[in-house]
Image (tube, rainbow, N blue to C red):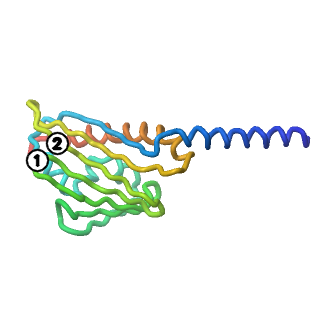
Amino acid sequence: MLRLLRILLLGVGFLVIGVVVIGAFLPRTWSVERSRTLRAPPERVQETLEDLRTWDAWTPWSKARDPSVQVTFDGPPRGAGSRMSWEGQLLGFGSLTLVQATPGAGVEYEILFRGVDQGTRGSLALVPDPAGTRITWRDGGELGWNPIMRVFAGLLEAKLGVDFDDGLARLAGLVEAPR
């Protein structure tokens, strides 16, 4: 029994050391980018992006995912300085602030989560397209020296990529609908 316990502890120890060593050589940053062409003019898309009250209708992080989420809004009603904060059982505690809004070209934002040292910076960039508007959603952040976070960054990127695709599809439905 003692021999089996030693073998098990050695195995776990080598596994931990392996994760730390592998993680040390992985990138210190993560990033996700997805694009889609929307059949709507840039002005209509921009109007939706600048109004954080519309984000529940198209982002994947909404009441549809976490019915318990409570959202509050601060700052100007739209554009740079607008901020929404949320608290929910699944989505946790955090805030999103629009740090820049360029007419017809998109928005940049910062997301902060309670208990997480570093926030993320992202953007929704708009480019006129013959079919309407090409939108590119980018987000990324620092992982620091934590080797475990570095090992799991690929999973984070894959999951966020799926969420971005879903959000862009929902945004398309929103801005392409007749008014």
* Residue 63 disc label: none
Question: At label 2, which amino acid type do we have?
Answer: Leu
Where the N terminus falls, by quadrant?
top right
Query: Which residue position is annotated with label 1?
Result: 104
Query: Is 55 rendered above or below residue 175?
Result: below
CB atoms at circles 1 and 2 under 8 Å apart?
Answer: yes
Instruction: Please count the marks in the image.
Output: 2
- Residue 164 position within the rendered picture, expressed as x and y whole percent measured from the top left: 32, 41
The residue positioned 31% from the left and 59% from the top of the image is: 96
Secondary structure state at the residue bearing disc 1: loop
CA separation, marks 1 and 2? 7 Å
Q: Residue at x 26, y 37 (%)?
A: 169
Which of disc 2 and disc 1 is earlier in sequence? 1
Decide: is 69 above or below 134.
below
Q: Secondary structure at mark 2?
A: strand
The reply, left or right, for residue 141 in relation to residue 42 is: right
The residue carrying pointer 2 sits among few (fewer than 14), some (14 to 19) or many (20 or more) residues within 10 Å by Cα, namely many
In the visual, does 151 lie left or right of 8?
Answer: left
Query: Which residue in the structure is indicated by mark 2?
Result: 126
Which percent across, then down, holds residue 20? 61, 43
